Image (cartoon, helix red, strand yellow):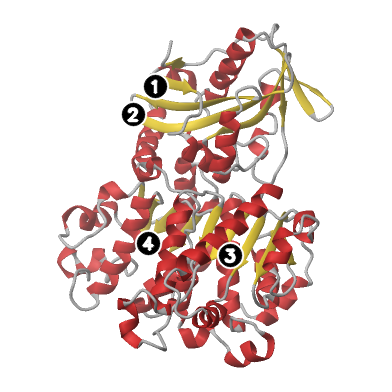
Amino acid sequence: MDFKQIKINLKKDFTGYKKVKVAIIADSATQYLAQAIRGIGYERKLDIEVWEAPYDAIDITVNDDKSELYEFKPDFTLVFLSVQKMKTKFYKTGFDAEFAQNTINYLKRTVSVISTKIKTNFLIFNFPDGLDPVFGNFGGKIRNSFSYQVKKMNVELMDWMQNDTSVSLIDLCGLQSMYGFSNAIDNRLYISSDVHFSMDFALEVANNCVQVIDVYSGNSKKCLILDLDNTIWGGIIGDDGLENIQIGDLGIGKIYTGIQTWIKALKDRGIILAVCSKNDELNAREPFEKHPDMVLKSDDIAVFVANWSNKHDNIKYIQSILNIGFDSMVFIDDNPFERNMVRTYLPEICVPELPEDPADYLSYLNKLNLFETNAYTHEDKERTQLYKAEALRNAASLTYSSEREFLKNLDMVSEVKAIDLFSIPRVSQLTQRSNQFNLRTVRYTEEDIKRIVSKNDAYTTFDFSLSDKYGSHGLIGIIILEKKNDETLFIDTWIMSCRVLKRGMEKFMLNEIMKFAQKNNFKNVIGEYLETKKNIIVKDHYESLGFYKEKNLWYCNVKEYKFNSCYIKNANE
């Protein structure tokens, strides 16, 4: 994409796209960045309204209670301090050894002041660094060099963000190292307009900003589907045999070992791996089980499909097992024909157009940054095993004469408890990522959940874990009840993982809500369904559970409620 396409996108109709407000406060000109963010947002079906603070007026903007920033009420606030201006300031202060800490404290104060006035998420840029122009390589050895201070600022920035979930990092250092210093800066543009990115690099920066915003909007890639031959190893296993496929530390094998190492790291981070290959299954599985140089093993693959059917049909089968949206999937295949077939029949799936030379695969995929995230929890590490167990359940369900018999024999047990400090990260993650079984699609950060949990007089919370004879599903459901008054509970949030659909979990969760309501003498429970493009599956949720509708809300009389029967036991009873 270039700025010509950005200008075309800016004139297009954003009707129906998710609305997001973004504010930019910076010490330099950001008009190209602002345009790029809105234009790239169109590609992701986001209607991003961008407001820019007055030029180089961060303090005036932030400290003025009547500032347009606070009237705008952005969902995201981008804070950018240019390293070029900091360098000038640093030299004027006389090589201040406390420069880094003072800069971080300034950013913290800026975030704190804004946070007292509006609720917003922050995107803060780190600081690229080149060879120290004053001390050269020696600059890394003394505290009062600019090079040392910039590196310290970046470490302090990351340490700060460990404990503040409202602040996210835009890794300008990583981007600039990937694209090169000479490509990132346009000296003529900087001199004439005080613009600190070249126009091409502004696109890359904007794309990364939009990727983070998109994740907060509930859109993230959860699954990587792999072709095998000439994609994760060189050669064709059915023709060349186990001994002759190319993988390992020699020659072209290095390419595929590097790709597998990247894929393995994604799996360990929580991305689900699946195989979709035109192959005999025994041949396709053999390298995973027998080749000494394979980084990926059978246990890393949640769903393994190898046959001679169309790949788009096989991907549909994979999706039916994983029960996630096609737009959460990425498919990589070396064959242009297969890529185009999948794009044609499954247009929601992301299918990168791999370069012709396999040596360029990994660098190309790294630049795409397909698997942006805003959270990492313990359950992410266990995700592959969760889905492998789900595949076993699906296979077992086919051996029963009815769904009722299958559920009865699953031996399901749910642990029900209030949301606590241990579950807050996973609960926040569910609100951010869950799109299908999400009645109101309200997104909460960890800080938001902490505030809700602390208000016992206003809210009651539940989190639900589920296990059965095949293993644990982990934490799969959350309920947040708002106490409107002494008689009424409002279901602020009802989210459930799609992994446990058709298990009766929604009936079990409602039973728990009603137990609490009866015990505490509430008379009514009120629910609300706010429709999105992705949560249509719960459109009839409240009606199917016996609620009646008045205007836009769903009501259930606590006293008249008849408890639903299901095959799930409460671990605490």
Q: Quadrant of residue 307?
A: bottom left
Placement of the N terminus among the 4 image quadrants: bottom right
Q: Could you say whether the residue bearing mark 2 is in a helix, strand or loop?
A: loop
Amino acid type at mark 3: Cys
Q: Is residue 162 left or right of residue 493?
A: left
Q: CA distance from mark 1 to mark 4?
A: 33 Å
Q: Residue at image x 51%, y 24%?
A: 418
Q: Dot 1 corresponds to which residue?
A: 410
Alpha carbons under labels 2 and 3: distance apart: 40 Å
- Position of 354 with respect to 117 (left or right) is left
Q: Nearer the viewer, mark 1 or mark 4?
A: 1
Residue at label 4? 227
Q: Along the polypeptide, which appears first: circle 1 or circle 4?
A: 4
Nearest to N terminus: mark 4 or mark 2: 4
Task: Using the image, determine if residue 513 lies above or below residue 552.
Answer: above
Q: Nearer the viewer, mark 1 or mark 3?
A: 3
Residues packed near mark 1 inside 10 Å, few (<14), some (14 to 19) or many (20 plus) = some
Which one is earlier in the sequence, the residue at label 1 or at label 3? 3
- Residue 493 image point, x, y percent: 63, 32
Mark 2 against mark 3, which lies toward the viewer? 3
Residue 470: numbered disc: 2
Question: Nearer the observer, disc 4 or disc 2?
Answer: 2
Q: Label 4 is placed on what type of residue?
A: Asp
